Amino acid sequence: MKIIVCYKWTLDEADIRVDAATRAVLKERAKYRISPYDRNAVECGVRLAGKSGGEVVALSVGTAELGNSAKDILSRGVTRLAWLGCQELEDADAAGTARALAAAARKIGDYDLIVCGEGSSDSYSQQTGPRLAELLDIPVVTCASEISLDGSRLTVKRKLEEGFEITETTLPALITVLPDINEPRIPGLKEILGASKKPAERFSAEDLGLDPETLKPLARRDSLLGTATDRRRIVLKGEGAAAELLTILKQEGFC
Amino acid sequence: MYDLTQEEQLIIQSVREYAENVMAPAAKEADVTGEFPWEVINKGIELGLHALSIPEEYGGPGMSALMSAVISEELSKACAGMATTLGATGLSCYPVLIAGTDEQKKLYFDIIQSGKLGAFCLTEPGAGSDSGSVAATAVREGGEYVLNGNKTFITNGAVASVYTVFATVDRAKGLKGLSAFIVERDRAGVSVGKEENKMGIRASNTTDVIFTNVRIPAGHLLGKEGDGFKIAMKTLDSSRAGVGAQAVGICQAALEASIRYANERKQFGAPISANQGIQFMLADMAIQTEAARALVRHACRLQDAGQPYGKEAAMCKTFAGDTAMKVTTDAVQIFGGYGYSRDYPIEKLMRDAKIMQIFEGTNQIQRVVVAGHILRP
């Protein structure tokens, strides 16, 4: 069995600051890490392969910076890493990312299952997984919170807003997973120290038959500013305060 | 840190995740009940955190002294008691690392790496700082040694699967009779005595260990007969920076909690951190913590570089231990009544800090070691 697990190398948003005066987004202190839901995807693939035997290929696409993720991802139980690094993928949108991932998945070939996180911690568009499945022409099941595999039949419990749905599909297929699906492992010392001995293959766009220009985002970003919520800071005092509050709330359309 | 490899940074990331998500949530209950947190410790063992110093050729992670100290600090920040359990296994490995043959190393390290804990058995009721007074005996009978004696204050006493034990082959020889042995827990005659009900590091297990006519193969003697004192001293030299690092971890926990609290706690209409009196306390805590950390890491770097480090190891253990006591006392002061309450995690830090001045050589003995170094002609 060959499982591909996809991951995104994102900035840790907890360390991103917004300058109060200019609203400029300050990324200097933020470090890259594997997007949290993708850690669930990796864990899901590794556990399935552990039960059924076979290999787990970690796959990602991005700029050259992505190379720094190799030891981290390879310490999490996967068999090997394949990644595409090209500058055109800087600020890639879900369409470009899916196109690049699809070409890489075809190059890896013979996959039975592809596991993605439900969304990335930076943009959380929830599009990359379904787009990738469409490009590869395989079924996709999103919002997976539990899975079980019986031969080539995959049963998925989907967590939806109004309840659960159990669905079945045959392999090859793609699933996107929610964090409920598992508790990702903490890599041990030996796994970390052994990571550099595992194979890591870097593809170029040419290797995958891709025109790098087609990977660029379709939309153009003119600026990036942090959001700022301006509070009214209205303080009501004295006897008529409650009535006055009610009037204001009505004016604002809250009641 | 500025001088870590990518692997080392990833290791620290894993250690932090374990400390914050696995250890810290279990710390209070283990402290209150004194029950041994097997689930947490087993997870640490799974990650390899009990076997840091075992070399790569024996299947271990072969961590440098510096990395071991950084790891120890991170763990102790979450729970010094649990960090002590993992660290004491490392301590028990040192006599084997220092004096063991290839076969002995395989024997001991295989047990540890199969997921077991170890314990270092030197202290006796009548032999604490004065290791020369060890009364436990080892008598050679054919191809075996027969061990008899009582050890006390043994960290991991009841939870270890293997011990490094110090006993004398000839009491008349004093220090020169002291010898070191590997003893498996399941040998006939090994038993566990009273468990200490401790003031701090209550998540760790401390017991008497009793050896009654315990027969071990002669091949379990580490080094030669009479090498015991040398092995014990080298072991304690090697482990002192680790204790210093534990103390620094406690300091850091106290400092961070104090900064948070001083910013949140409002009195007279302002956070108490607006008062210069509190600011100076926090600044002093930060200065002392950083100085202790620098001294610990300096001793480790000397050790890793293969240079003499005995003096610096004693200095850092003493300074960091004393600093932990001071910094945690100040943290309790900043928290005021809440600091004194067992509902808040601050008083635990103060109780945990105290042992850092006592175990693995009291800070008075450390000063004897330092004086010995600086007065040497």
Image (spheres, coloured by chain):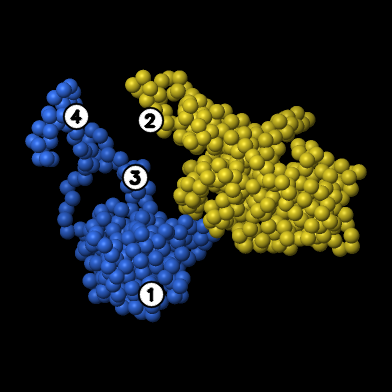
Chain colours: A blue, B yellow
Q: Chain of mark 1?
A: A
Please state if A1 lies on the left or on the right of A197 as rendered: left
| CA–CA distance in space, label 2 to label 1 | 51 Å
- Which residue position is annotated with label 2? B264
| CA–CA distance in space, label 1 to label 3 | 36 Å
Q: Secondary structure at mark 1?
A: strand
* Mark found first going from the N terminus, 4 or 3: 3
- Which callout, 4 or 3, points to the residue nearer the camera? 4
| CA–CA distance in space, label 2 to label 3 | 20 Å
The answer to whether residue B72 of the structure is visible from this angle is no
Confirm whether circles 1 and 3 share one chain.
yes
Picture residue at 46% right of the left edge, 75% below the top: A53
Confirm whether circles 4 and 2 share one chain.
no
Confirm whether circles 2 and 1 share one chain.
no
Q: Residues within 10 Å of mark 2 (few under 14, many from 20)?
A: few
Q: Chain of mark 4?
A: A
Q: Residues within 10 Å of mark 4 (few under 14, many from 20)?
A: few
Evaluate if marks 1 and 3 touch, with contact meaning CB atoms under 8 Å apart.
Answer: no
